[in-house]
């Protein structure tokens, strides 16, 4: 992926998410399908807070980690505000229009969405300072 990005003329850096630090502070950091690689989640959140000025966004599988534990780690690391949104639309393939719209509507369905998250799907987590 790195080689492909560079071949397309994009600025791409390769590094371990536990130790990586950009050359200058950033407004927001995104981390998709990778938070699970953090050696120590609290330490990772603290590290990201040192170079991220406003927001950290990542996906979270609530069947893999207790939501309450992740929220506690975020707050302890200096991310006091956290917004959660169920995330049902797949990122690997396009869905037919009506199905995609139905999933987006289901993401906002409250109790139904929380029920679905017990068995499938992830949260989109946006933590801010």
Image (cartoon, helix red, strand yellow):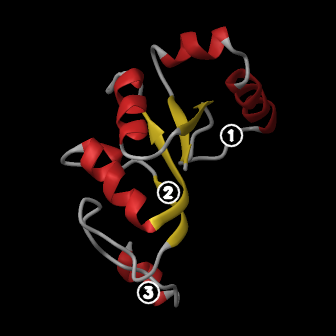
What is the C-alpha distance between the residues marked 3 and 1? 29 Å
Q: Residue at x 27, y 72 (%)?
A: 15
Q: Position of residue 4 (x, y in %)?
A: 43, 80
Q: Residue at x 45, y 15 (%)?
A: 119
Looking at this view, is 13 or 20 the one in front? 20
Q: Position of residue 80 (x, y in %)?
A: 51, 39
Q: Position of residue 57 (x, y in %)?
A: 52, 49
Helix, strand or loop at mark 2? strand
Query: From the viewer's perspective, is the residue at label 2 or at label 3 nearer?
Result: 2
Q: Which residue is mark 2?
A: 30
Q: Residue at x 35, y 22 (%)?
A: 66
Task: Say which label, 2 or 3, has the lower sequence index.
Answer: 3
Looking at this view, is 102 or 32 the one in front? 32
Task: Say which label, 2 or 1, has the lower sequence index.
Answer: 2
Query: From the viewer's perspective, is the residue at label 2 or at label 1 nearer?
Result: 2
Q: Is residue 63 above or below residue 4?
A: above
Query: From the viewer's perspective, is the residue at label 3 or at label 1 nearer?
Result: 3
Q: Is residue 112 above or below residue 98?
A: above
Q: Which residue is mark 1?
A: 95
Q: Position of residue 91 (x, y in %)?
A: 56, 47
Task: Say which label, 3 or 1, has the lower sequence index.
Answer: 3
Q: Is residue 100 left or right of residue 74?
A: right
Helix, strand or loop at mark 1? loop
Q: Which residue is mark 3?
A: 6
Helix, strand or loop at mark 3? helix
């Amino acid at each position: 992926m790195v080689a492909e990005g560079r071949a397309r003329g994009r600025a791409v850096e390769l590094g371990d998410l536990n130790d990586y630090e950009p050359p200058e502070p950033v407004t927001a950091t995104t981390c998709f399908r990778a938070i699970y690689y953090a050696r120590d989640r609290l330490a990772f959140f603290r590290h990201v807070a040192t170079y991220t000025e406003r927001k950290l966004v990542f996906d979270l599988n609530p069947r893999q980690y207790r939501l309450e534990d992740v929220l506690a780690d975020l707050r302890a690391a200096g991310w006091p505000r956290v917004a959660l949104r169920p995330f049902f639309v797949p990122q690997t393939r396009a869905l037919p229009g009506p199905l995609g719209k139905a999933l987006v509507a289901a993401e906002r369905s409250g109790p139904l969405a929380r029920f679905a998250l017990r068995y499938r799907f992830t949260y989109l987590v946006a933590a801010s300072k």
